[in-house]
C-alpha cells in the first residue's frame, strides 16, 4: 500500500475553489514539535470548518509537518487509508490527528477509536466557536498498562483539556517520548529480546472450559500472556470475528499491553483472521494454529517434524489467498520458525509439491511402523498403549513403571514422539509399553490426518491404558473427548483399562467414588502409589492366550530397536 502524502481527502463535495485553495494553503503551515497545534493553525482550520459546517482535520508528523488535510461532515471525519501497520502493536505510528468539532471540544467515541485503531500518537479536537474562532481543546493518548502496576480497570486514556489552544498544558514531544519509553519497558524482555511474543487471549467461545483450556495452551506455547479479553458470543462475528465495539476494545488492550498477537479460543475462517489483523494490527492465532505451533515447537524426531510440517502446510493452504496478505500471514505462527518462511519462498504451487512429498514420507513412515509392529508380534510381546488427555500424566506413568526419565512437565503436549519401553511383569513376563501424543477435544483434523501414522500404532495395542487426571475439574469433559477421539480412530473395540492418576491430590473417599464410577484403578504416578494394583489389573486384562515371554534379564529396559526405529 503506497501512502500518498500531502493530500486533501474526505468529503469534498460542493466545496468552492476558494475553499479548496484555503485547504491547500494548510500545508504551508508547520507546528513546533513540542506543541499539539499552534493557535494560527487552529484558527485557520476553524475558519474553514465554520464556513463549510464540516469537521476539518490534519494528520501531523512528529516533526510538526502536515501530512494530510481531511474534511468530514458535521459530526465526524473519515481518516484516509494511511497504510497498514504490521508486525504487532509495536510503537505508536508517529502521527497525530488534530481536528475541529462544531459543537463541543470533547472527544467522542469515534475519535478514541481512531486513536486506538490507527495507533495515533494523540488525537485532539478544537471547538469552533460561533464566531469561527477556535475555542476549547481536548487531547488524548492511550495509557500503557504494565503488569503488576495499575489495575486493568484504570482509565485507558490520558485526557488533557484546555480552555483554548494556547493554554493546553501538554509538552507534546516530551509526553510522547515518555509514553514510548513506557511502552518500550512493557515490551522489554519479551518479543524483541527473547523471541517470546506477547499475546492477548481472546475468549469468544460459548463455554468457560474452552477458554480455560486456551489459556493453558497459550501457557504451553512459547508466548507470554499479557492479558485476556472475554466475550461470550454464540457464533463469531461473520466478518471480523468480533463486533466493531469489541474490536476497538481488543485493539486498545493490545496497545496498552503491547501485545503482538491475539489468541482466540475458537477456530477462525481465513477471511475473519485477515479482517481482524487488518483492523487491529495484531496477528490472529486461532485454536488450531495454536495447537499446531505447540506441536511445531515440540517436534524432536524426524517423524514428528515431518508430520507437523505437513499439518501446518495443510492448515495454511486455504489461508494463502492473496499474494501479499496471505503469504505474510504464513509467518503467522508463534515461537516457531520454519514452515512459515519456507512457504514464503516456496509459493503456492510448490507448496502442493511439498505436501505431496511429505504425504509420501508419512506413508513410508506408516509402512515402517507396520514392520516394527509385526516384528513385535513375532516376538509375541503384548503391547500396552498409554493414551489419554494431554497433561494427564501419561509420560510420568511410563517413567514410573519402567524407571525411565522421559521428559514430562506441567504443560500441554509435552510428548509428541511415541516412546516405547519394555517392561517385565511379575506373572505375565515382558510387555511393550508405549506412550504417545496426548489428546485434546476438537483435535484439529489436519493434525489427526498428519499424525495418522502415530495414532495408527494404537490399533495394534493389546490393551489401552486410558490415563486421566482424577483431580481435574474438567475430568468428565476430558473423558468424553478421549472417548470421541477413540471412536473417530475406530479404537473403541480395543480392551481398555481406565487409570485415574494424580490420586495424591484428592482424598481417599473421592478416589473410591471415582474409581467405582469409572471402573478404574486409582494411582499416583508421581508418588508411585497404586502401581502394584495397576499391574495386577493389567495382568488380569491381558488375554491369557499369549505365551509368557521372560528370557530377558532385569525388570525393564528400553526397547532399543523400537526407539532407534522411530528416530
Ligand atoms: N500431583 C501429581 N502430579 C502428577 C502425577 N503424575 C503426573 N503429574 C504431573 O502432571 C504433569 C503432566 O505430566 P506428564 O507425564 O507430562 O503428562 P502427559 O500426559 O504425558 O502430558 P503430555 O505429554 O503433555 O500430553 C506433570 O507436571 C507431572 O509432574 C501424579 O500422580 N500426581
Ligand atoms: Mg507426555
Image (tube, grey):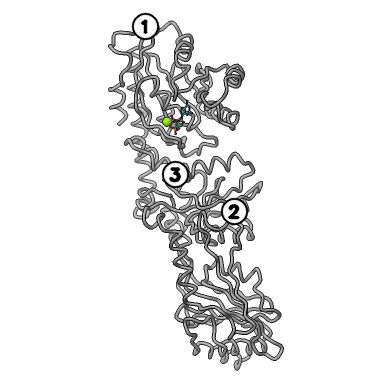
Q: Position of residue 423 (x, y in %)?
A: 36, 16
Does residue 437 appear to the left or right of 507 in the view shown?
left
User: What SS does tag 2 mark?
Assistant: loop
Residue 333 vertical placement versus 256 (above, below): above
Quadrant (top left, top right, bottom left, bottom right) of the C terminus: top left
Q: Earlier in the sequence, mark 2 or mark 3?
A: 3
Looking at the image, is mark 1 or mark 3 nearer the viewer? Answer: 3
Residue 257 vertical placement versus 41 (above, below): above
Kindly identify which residue carries mark 2: 241
Query: Disc 2 and disc 3: Cα gap in Å?
Result: 23 Å
Is the CB–ligand 1 distance for label 3 below 8 Å? no
Q: Quadrant of ligand 1?
A: top left
Q: Residue furthest bottom?
A: 18
Q: Residue at x 39, y 42 (%)?
A: 296
Residue 221 numbered tag:
3
Q: Position of residue 186 (x, y in %)?
A: 46, 59
User: Badge 1: few (under 14), some or many (20 or more) residues near its Cα, within 10 Å?
Assistant: some
Q: Earlier in the sequence, mark 1 or mark 3?
A: 3
Q: Position of residue 263 (x, y in %)?
A: 52, 50
Q: Position of residue 410 (x, y in %)?
A: 45, 35
User: What SS does tag 3 mark?
Assistant: loop
Q: Residue at x 28, y 11 (%)?
A: 552
Query: Which quadrant of the structure image shows residue 514?
Result: top right
User: Badge 2: few (under 14), some or many (20 or more) residues near its Cα, within 10 Å?
Assistant: many
Does residue 314 appear to the left or right of 486 in the view shown?
left
Looking at the image, is mark 2 or mark 3 nearer the viewer? Answer: 3
Query: Disc 1 and disc 3: Cα gap in Å?
Result: 44 Å
Kindly identify which residue carries mark 1: 548
Query: Disc 2 and disc 1: Cα gap in Å?
Result: 59 Å
Q: How many marks?
A: 3
Q: Residue at x 53, y 91 (%)?
A: 25
Amino acid at each position: 500500500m503506497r501512502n500518498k502524502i500531502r493530500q486533501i481527502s474526505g468529503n469534498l463535495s460542493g466545496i468552492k475553489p476558494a475553499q479548496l485553495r484555503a485547504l491547500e494553503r494548510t500545508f504551508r503551515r508547520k507546528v513546533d514539535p513540542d506543541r499539539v497545534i499552534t493557535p494560527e493553525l487552529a484558527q485557520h482550520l476553524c475558519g474553514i470548518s465554520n464556513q463549510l459546517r464540516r469537521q476539518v482535520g490534519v494528520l501531523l508528523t512528529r516533526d510538526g509537518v502536515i501530512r494530510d488535510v481531511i474534511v468530514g461532515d458535521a459530526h465526524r471525519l473519515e481518516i484516509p487509508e494511511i497504510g497498514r501497520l504490521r508486525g504487532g502493536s509495536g510503537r505508536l505510528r508517529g502521527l497525530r490527528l488534530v481536528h475541529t468539532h462544531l459543537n463541543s471540544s470533547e472527544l467522542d467515541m469515534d475519535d478514541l477509536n481512531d486513536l486506538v485503531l490507527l495507533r495515533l500518537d494523540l488525537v485532539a479536537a478544537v471547538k469552533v466557536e460561533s464566531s469561527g474562532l477556535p475555542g476549547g481543546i481536548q487531547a488524548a493518548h492511550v495509557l500503557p498498562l504494565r503488569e503488576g502496576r495499575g489495575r486493568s480497570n484504570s482509565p485507558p486514556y490520558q485526557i488533557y483539556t484546555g480552555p483554548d489552544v494556547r493554554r493546553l498544558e501538554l509538552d507534546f514531544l516530551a509526553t510522547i517520548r515518555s509514553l514510548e519509553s513506557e511502552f518500550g519497558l512493557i515490551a522489554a524482555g519479551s518479543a524483541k529480546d527473547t523471541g517470546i511474543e506477547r499475546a492477548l487471549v481472546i475468549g469468544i467461545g460459548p463455554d468457560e472450559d474452552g477458554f480455560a483450556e486456551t489459556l493453558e495452551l497459550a501457557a504451553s506455547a512459547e508466548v507470554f500472556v499479557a492479558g485476556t479479553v472475554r466475550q461470550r458470543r454464540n457464533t463469531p462475528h461473520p466478518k471480523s470475528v468480533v463486533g466493531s465495539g469489541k474490536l476497538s476494545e481488543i485493539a486498545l488492550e493490545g496497545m496498552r499491553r503491547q501485545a503482538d498477537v491475539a489468541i482466540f479460543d475458537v477456530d477462525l475462517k481465513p477471511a475473519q483472521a485477515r479482517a481482524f489483523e487488518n483492523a487491529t494490527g495484531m496477528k490472529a492465532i486461532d485454536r488450531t494454529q495454536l495447537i499446531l505451533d505447540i506441536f511445531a515447537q515440540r517436534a524432536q524426531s524426524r517423524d514428528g517434524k515431518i508430520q507437523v510440517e505437513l499439518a501446518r502446510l495443510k492448515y495454511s493452504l486455504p489461508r494463502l489467498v492473496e499474494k501479499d496478505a496471505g503469504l505474510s500471514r504464513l509467518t503467522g505462527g508463534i515461537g516457531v520458525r520454519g514452515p512459515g518462511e519456507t512457504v514464503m519462498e516456496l509459493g503456492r504451487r510448490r507448496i502442493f509439491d511439498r505436501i505431496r512429498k511429505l504425504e509420501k514420507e508419512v506413508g513410508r513412515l506408516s509402512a515402517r511402523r507396520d514392520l516394527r509392529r509385526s516384528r513385535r508380534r513375532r516376538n509375541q510381546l503384548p503391547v500396552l498403549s498409554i493414551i489419554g488427555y494431554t497433561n494427564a500424566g501419561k509420560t510420568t506413568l511410563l517413567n514410573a513403571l519402567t524407571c525411565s526419565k522421559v521428559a514430562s512437565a506441567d504443560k500441554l503436549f509435552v510428548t509428541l514422539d511415541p516412546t516405547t519401553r519394555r517392561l517385565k511383569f511379575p506373572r505375565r513376563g515382558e510387555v511393550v509399553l508405549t506412550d504417545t501424543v496426548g489428546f485434546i477435544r476438537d483435535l484439529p483434523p489436519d493434525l489427526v490426518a498428519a499424525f495418522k501414522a502415530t495414532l495408527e500404532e494404537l490399533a495394534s495395542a493389546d490393551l489401552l491404558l486410558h490415563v486421566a487426571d482424577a483431580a481435574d475439574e474438567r475430568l468428565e469433559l476430558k473423558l468424553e473427548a478421549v472417548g470421541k477421539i477413540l471412536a473417530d480412530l475406530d479404537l473403541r473395540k480395543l480392551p481398555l483399562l481406565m487409570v485415574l492418576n494424580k490420586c495424591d491430590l484428592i482424598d481417599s473417599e473421592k478416589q473410591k467414588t471415582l474409581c467405582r464410577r469409572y471402573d478404574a484403578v486409582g494411582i499416583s504416578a508421581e508418588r508411585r502409589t497404586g502401581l502394584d494394583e495397576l499391574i495386577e489389573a493389567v495382568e488380569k486384562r491381558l488375554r491369557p492366550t499369549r505365551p509368557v515371554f521372560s528370557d530377558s534379564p532385569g525388570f525393564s529396559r528400553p526397547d532399543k530397536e523400537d526407539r532407534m526405529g522411530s528416530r
